[in-house]
Image (cartoon, rainbow, N blue to C red):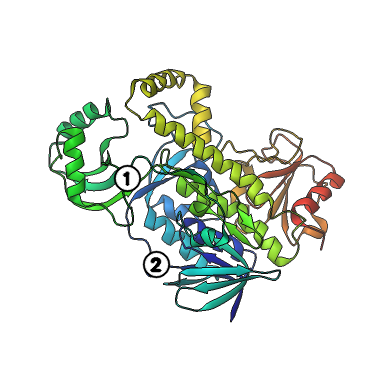
């Protein structure tokens, strides 16, 4: 029986990112993916500010910038028009990319680092004991690992076999989304689409290239989404909602999504953990789903690696759930709110008009953008300055950029005093002594996920936090 440190079910964005994070710490990883070929649905998704920062921290962003399309970080909340606020980030924009490009990039990164990726391998069952997890594949093969991570999507087999409840609301309204072509004059399309949007806030028929349009139109009800809709389905619904099918033809991709909203009751049961859509699903309002899964993976990766390597502090792995589940709950709430604001009834539209006025206040607009883009997250790491528990923006350090020094996924001590050191934790934590670093504190300790774990100027206090996050000294 093959034995691995960690088996990951699912090679989507969360699974591929988790595999790469584990390999940075020499964890033996096997990724099993039920699909025999990589995802081909060419839907455009947006990478938000925090995800862009994470990719920059791992040296993964530049190739994607060359393939993506940037647009201002504005108008994310319920599609309400608002200017892009000033936010503290070197990556204060949205990067639009086809989802297959992102997944392929992360998968290739994981493979370069040494992750084994096996396609056409679906998890059928699992059982765990004190020493590890036994995984049965659909073809009858049996695998063994010390830990199993379920990154296998909304219908997660891992979650179901684990018996973790997935409470929430079922889908009540389906929406058709796709990209297709139209030969009508662009000004005619724009005028008709704007007229429809006055009463159907969730409708969209906007250009994504010459003659190609992104279409979002309410479906006729709820349906099984295993099969994508057809062009005729789109044209039929366009005629009902907009009074015209816009002469639509030649679809690039077509899909159907619902507004189901669910959150797993547990992110960890023994040696099995959940991440990405296996742990949470929600409407696509604000484009947060892929970003949330990638950020799950970066929070979990270094903690699970420390557990496998044998130097994890007590309860470190449990902080994955205590930190990430509340973040997902906030995303579910803001997508519920955005979905409600798209309803055509007078009550929701009155609230929408009021919120539109409030978003003219810069602080309100900034707060909502920071919430959607996940740069407002502050993990509860105890009492301390406001910086504690927050992510650190990419700042000047050591004559370059801080994020360029975080590619290895290790802890990082940035010291302006010149008196502090990592000592017996130097095998897990890097050090940069730079009196000119753009910090408002004497020194700070970063976790591998880029969140501040400690600030101060006292070696004893630093040692205590090195032990808290990185285990006993070597």
Q: Nearer the viewer, residue 82 or 32?
A: 32
Nearest to viewer (mark 2 / mark 1): 1
Question: What number is the disc on residue 4?
Answer: none
Q: Residues within 10 Å of mark 1 (few under 14, many from 20)?
A: some
Q: Position of residue 378 (x, y in %)?
A: 64, 38
Question: Callout 2: few (<14), some (14-19), or many (20+) C-alpha neighbours within 10 Å?
Answer: some
Write down the residue under mark 1.
222
Dot 1: what SS? loop
Question: Which quadrant of the figure has residue 387?
Answer: top right
Q: Residue at x 73, y 33 (%)?
A: 385
- Of residues 14 and 457, the one drawn nearer to the viewer in this rendering: 14
| Residue 257 position within the rendered picture, expressed as x and y whole percent measured from the top left | 35, 47
2 and 1 marks in contact (CB < 8 Å): no
Report how far apart the C-alphas of labels 2 and 1 lie in the structure: 25 Å
Q: Is residue 8 above or below residue 172?
A: below
In x, y percent, where is residue 313? Answer: 77, 56
**Residue where numbered disc 2 is placed:** 35
Q: Secondary structure at mark 2?
A: loop
- Position of the N terminus, as image quadrant, is bottom right
Q: Quadrant of the C terminus?
A: bottom right
Specify whether 71 is left or right of 52: left
Residue shown at the point (53%, 51%) measured from the top left: 279
Of residues 281 and 254, which is closer to you in this image?
A: 281
Location of residue 174 by image quarter: top left
Q: Is residue 395 visible?
A: yes
In the image, 447 versus 357, the foreground residue is: 357
Numbered-mark total: 2
User: Residue visible at 73% across and 56% down?
Assistant: 429
Residue 450 horizontal/vertical position (percent):
63, 47
Q: Earlier in the sequence, mark 2 or mark 1?
A: 2
For this view, does 205 lie left or right of residue 342?
left
The residue at the point 44 percent across, 60 percent down is: 105
């Amino acid at each position: 029986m093959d034995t691995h440190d960690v088996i990951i079910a699912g090679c989507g964005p969360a699974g591929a990112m988790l595999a790469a994070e584990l390999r940075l710490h020499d964890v033996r990883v096997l990724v099993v993916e039920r699909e025999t070929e990589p995802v081909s649905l060419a839907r455009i998704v947006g990478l938000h500010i925090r995800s862009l920062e994470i990719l920059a921290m791992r040296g993964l962003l530049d190739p994607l910038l060359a393939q993506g399309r940037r647009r201002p970080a504005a108008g994310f909340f319920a599609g309400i028009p608002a200017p892009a606020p000033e936010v503290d980030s070197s990556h204060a924009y949205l990067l639009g990319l086809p989802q297959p490009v992102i997944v392929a990039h992360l998968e290739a990164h994981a493979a370069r680092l040494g992750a084994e990726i096996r396609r056409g391998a679906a998890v059928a069952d699992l059982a765990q004991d004190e020493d590890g997890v036994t995984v049965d594949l659909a073809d009858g093969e049996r695998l063994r690992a010390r830990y199993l991570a379920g990154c296998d999507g909304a219908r997660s087999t891992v979650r179901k076999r684990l018996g973790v409840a997935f409470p929430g609301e079922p889908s009540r309204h389906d929406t058709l989304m796709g990209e297709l072509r139209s030969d009508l004059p662009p000004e005619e399309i724009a005028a008709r689409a704007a007229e429809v949007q006055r009463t159907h806030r969730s409708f969209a028929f906007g250009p994504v290239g010459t003659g190609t349009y992104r279409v979002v139109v309410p479906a006729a009800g709820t349906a099984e989404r295993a099969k994508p809709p057809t062009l005729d389905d789109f044209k039929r619904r366009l005629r009902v909602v907009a009074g015209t099918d816009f002469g639509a033809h030649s679809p690039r991709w077509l899909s159907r999504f619902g507004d189901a909203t669910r959150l797993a009751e547990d992110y960890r049961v023994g040696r099995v953990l959940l991440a990405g859509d296996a742990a949470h699903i929600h409407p696509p309002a604000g484009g947060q789903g892929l970003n949330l899964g990638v950020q799950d993976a970066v929070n979990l990766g270094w903690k699970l690696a420390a557990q496998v390597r044998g130097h994890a502090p007590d309860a470190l792995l449990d902080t994955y759930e205590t930190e990430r589940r509340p973040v997902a709950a906030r995303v579910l709430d803001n997508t519920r709110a955005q979905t409600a604001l798209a309803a055509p009834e007078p009550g929701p539209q009155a609230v929408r008009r009021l919120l539109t006025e409030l978003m003219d206040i810069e602080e309100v607009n900034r707060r909502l953008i920071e919430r959607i883009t996940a740069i407002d997250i502050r993990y509860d790491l105890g009492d301390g300055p406001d910086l504690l528990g927050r992510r650190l923006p990419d700042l000047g350090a050591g004559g370059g950029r801080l994020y360029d020094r975080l590619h290895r996924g290790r802890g990082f001590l940035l010291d302006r005093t010149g008196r502090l050191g990592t000592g017996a934790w130097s095998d897990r934590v890097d050090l940069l002594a730079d009196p000119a670093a753009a910090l408002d504190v004497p020194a700070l300790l970063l976790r591998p996920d880029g969140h501040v774990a400690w600030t101060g100027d006292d070696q004893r206090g630093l040692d205590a936090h090195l032990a808290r996050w990185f285990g006993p000294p070597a």
